[in-house]
Amino acid sequence: MAGPTRVTVWGENVHEHISAAVKKIYPDGMHATIAEGLKKLLGNAVQVRTATLDQPAHGLTEKILAETDVLTWWGHAAHHKVEDVIVDRVQKRVLEGMGLVALHSAHYSKIFKRLMGTGCGLKWREAAEQERVWIVNPSHPIADGLGEYFEIAHEEMYGEFFDIPEPEDLVMISWFEGGDVFRSGCTWRRGKGKVFYFRPGHETFPTYHDANVQKVIANAVKWCAPTVGSPYSLAAPNSKVPLNPIRATHTVDETIHKH
């Protein structure tokens, strides 16, 4: 790609306004902290903007999405408030090549469930548990610069079974103090777009201030960025003119193809 990767950091931005505890940790919103982490680690290699649920079109107009190479998504309390027309719009852009980084409770977002085609449910426990994130695919670009594992002092637990399609790459798994494990760093491809799910990020803990977490998200943005390739068609065109002559004859009833 020529020029910097254009990143839109989408945040629900609800908890920050209704919870004093969350506001204290993220005074400008989780989306702002995630955006600052990307700017710090990637510098001039990225152009970062933020968008939130309460903006017109949830901050995701057709123009903004057309100018977005990678979209990061954090949501929790208001998944149901995301309009289906916006989900359609984001899905189309992913299929065309835009990357999506789904964070923490975005596993239940409309867009992630749409792209996965499964329920995306999991076990959870809101407790201040230690989380140890193991890098199980150290050769993957999203693992660049990380050690064998890293630890987060306090986090919400997510546990298996995680109802997702088999990941193309399993980059990380998490172990929790209470004994549960979880597939916490997974990749897929949808159309021409790359999707990465990353588990850490409960709103009442300062997880997005963590250097390792910021490193993972920055690596994911680089990996998810679209690359030059062959065209991808979202339509179902009628190819009436064949490449080679067809000897047999056939009467076509065009009415059966009309919707």
Image (tube, rainbow, N blue to C red):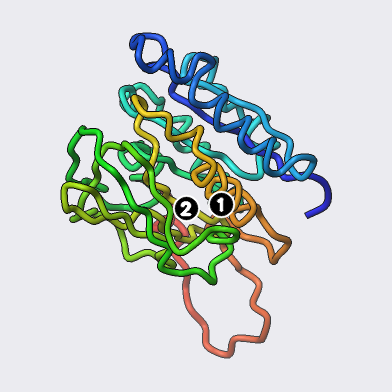
Q: Residues within 10 Å of mark 2 (few under 14, many from 20)?
A: many
Instruction: Determine the residue positioned at 24% across, 42% down.
Output: 157
Q: Is residue 196 above or below residue 242?
A: above
Viewer-nearest residue: 53 or 91: 53
Amino acid type assigned to the residue bearing label 2 in the image = Phe
Identify the element where label 1 is drawn. helix
Identify the element where label 2 is drawn. strand
Left or right of 50, for residue 205: left
Residue denoted by label 2: 196
Q: Position of residue 196 (x, y in %)?
A: 47, 52
Q: Nearer the viewer, mark 1 or mark 2?
A: 1
Q: Position of residue 257 (x, y in %)?
A: 43, 57
Q: Is residue 179 above or below residue 200?
A: below
Q: Position of residue 89 (x, y in %)?
A: 52, 36
Residue 220's tag is 1
Amino acid type assigned to the residue bearing label 1 in the image = Ala
- Of callouts 1 and 2, the N-terminal one: 2
